[in-house]
Amino acid sequence: MNLTTETLFDLRELTVAELVVRAQGGDRDAFGELFDRYRSAIVAGAMSRVRNADEADELAQDVFIQAMQKIDQLRVPEAFGGWLRQIVHRMAINRVTRNRSAIACDPETLEATCVSEDAPDRVAEHREQAEAVRNSIDRLGALDQETLTAFYLNGQTLIEMSDAFQAPIGTIKRRLHVARKRLAKEMDLLGAAV
């Protein structure tokens, strides 16, 4: 389909909700306009989570592909921006979790950049504890995992989490409290099993 200047102008005049409704009806040009309007914000959101420009660009592309495939599931067209942020949030957590152990470097770089005052036994103990925490988090429900990861690993503030989860700050505080209790219980169960 060949876009005319008039068609482009018409799309720029539409609200986000109108564009979403058109995109849900199969209008790829309307989705393209949504992409243009939200791309920079989604890349910035991705960058704040993955902390790598190339990864952020790739994640943003994946987010828009996911959004295009699932736009029919969006029930409130006005909520498109928040819905996209949720997709960024979930996909960033998945990407960070998947790539968590993929960081490697040569021994010379490691030796030059890592100085440890701790004895080897203490370092091993800290690693075991960190692995136990990761394993316990992996056994929690998705919402608990997302909440703990957002706050502790991604360093999000309660306000940022409130925006990302589209929930009041009081709800975020409660989720953190409940998720911490569940994590402690999982840690206790892990300790009892060992």
Image (cartoon, grey):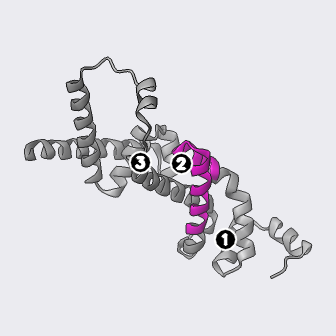
In whole angstroms, how far apart are the C-alphas of marks 2 and 1?
21 Å
Which label sits on residue 163? Answer: 2
Residue 119, position as x, y percentages in the image: 24, 20
Question: From what the image shows, is residue 165 above or below residue 119?
Answer: below
Name the residue at 34% across, 21% down. 116
In whole angstroms, how far apart are the C-alphas of marks 3 and 2?
30 Å
Say which quarter of the image contains residue 61. bottom right
For mark 1, give the secondary structure.
Answer: helix
- Quadrant holding the N terminus: bottom right
Which label sits on residue 5? Answer: none
Does residue 69 show up?
yes
- Quadrant holding the C terminus: top left
Quickly name the residue at label 3. 102
Confirm whether the magenta stretch covers residue 62.
yes
Residue 46, position as x, y percentages in the image: 57, 49
Residue 2, position as x, y percentages in the image: 84, 80
